[in-house]
Image (spheres, helix red, strand yellow):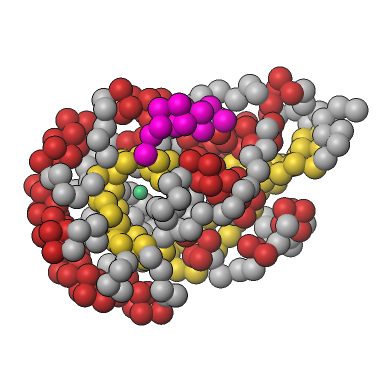
Amino acid sequence: MSLRFAFRLYQRRLRQPLRTARDAQITVRSGIWLRLETETELRWAEIAPWPSFGSETFAEAIAFCEAFPAQPTWVDLAAVPATLPACQFGFGCLRKPIRTGLLPTSAVLLPAGAAALRAIASAAPATTYKWKIGLDWESELELLLQLDRQLPRSAKLRLDANGGLTTAQADRWLQALTAINERQPGRIEWLEQPLDPNQVDGLLKLAQNWPQVPLALDESVSQLSSLQFWQTQSWPGLYILKPAIAGWPQTVLQFCQEHQLPVVVSSMFESPIGWRSVAAIAAQLGRADQAQGLGTTAWFADDWESKTAAALWQHPSNS
Ligand SMILES: [Mg+2]
């Protein structure tokens, strides 16, 4: 029997709009579900592009799926070009599913700006919180002090600028964060992607100048090739890995394991089909004592998390 391939698009509404220094305002998440019937089983996977992070566009991913044979061979499934890293993730998971082990713990993703303070008050207590900055940095510096006061004493805070700071602004932030970590070591777990990915020397210099606050790269390492580049630069900080847009999942996994990279895995508002594969990668790569960035599921108000892949595929609300 030959393989049978099908795909369908979905749309999913966020509980509240997502704002980052890179994306103006996102209210709806769109993605593509993949279904493969083999001789022995049904397999599901997801393509979840995020173009502002260097992946292909949604339209490019759809075009690839439309041109893909309905009765593919295993060779077809391995022939996705490097220009389509989100498609490589989806087809890579179809070809060789990544099974979920024990799910790692995850940081709570707070909304940007002052809404973070309200969110902390209503969120279940967690060990690690993540806050997006770089939208209005002067008011955020004041909010930081309030956040620091309001967070549980034992909690850690990671900040994510999404590449939105200038070098001068990054210095101001790192000065404030260093003061917090001097008072309470480890309170600020890291500052993520302070500068634009183009500023390679600037990022290396920040890491050198501010040793008391770890830095993490995210947008800088969003595909396998850029991950490889920073590994050769001996980056002294952490790597945020977004498997859904990084390329072939098995290749990425192997590279991180071979070089023992300090990786924290992050989801990108995938539906449960893609999210489960991302979480499985996090379970394999993440440090046991470090929360992973899988908290995007709480941003959706629907009940999709409780549904199986087969039920989602039949779901009436997808387009
Ligand atoms: Mg980030």
Is residue 153 depicted above or below 249 in this figure?
below
Report the predominant secondary structure element of the magenta stretch: helix
Residue 291 visible in the current orientation: yes
The answer to which quarter of the image holds residue 36 is top right
| Residue 251 belongs to magenta span | yes
> Which residue is painted at 41% across and 74% down in the image?
125
Residue 266 on image: x %, y %: 45, 48
Split into 4 quadrants, where in the image is the C terminus?
Answer: bottom right
Q: Nearest the camera: 249 or 212?
A: 212
Residue 12 in percent (x, y) is at: 58, 60
- Where residue 83 sits: x, y (%)? 49, 26
Horizontal side of residue 200 vs 305, given as left or right = left
On the question of residue 242 being in view, the answer is no
Residue nearest the observer in this picture, 149 or 62: 149
Describe residue 38's horizontal placement relative to residue 81 as left or right: right
* Boundaries of the magenta span: 250-262
In the rendered view, tell whether residue 293 sits above or below residue 234: below
Image position of 29 with respect to 168: above or below: below
Question: Which residue is nearer to you in this view: 284 or 82?
Answer: 284
| Residue 113 image-quadrant placement | bottom left
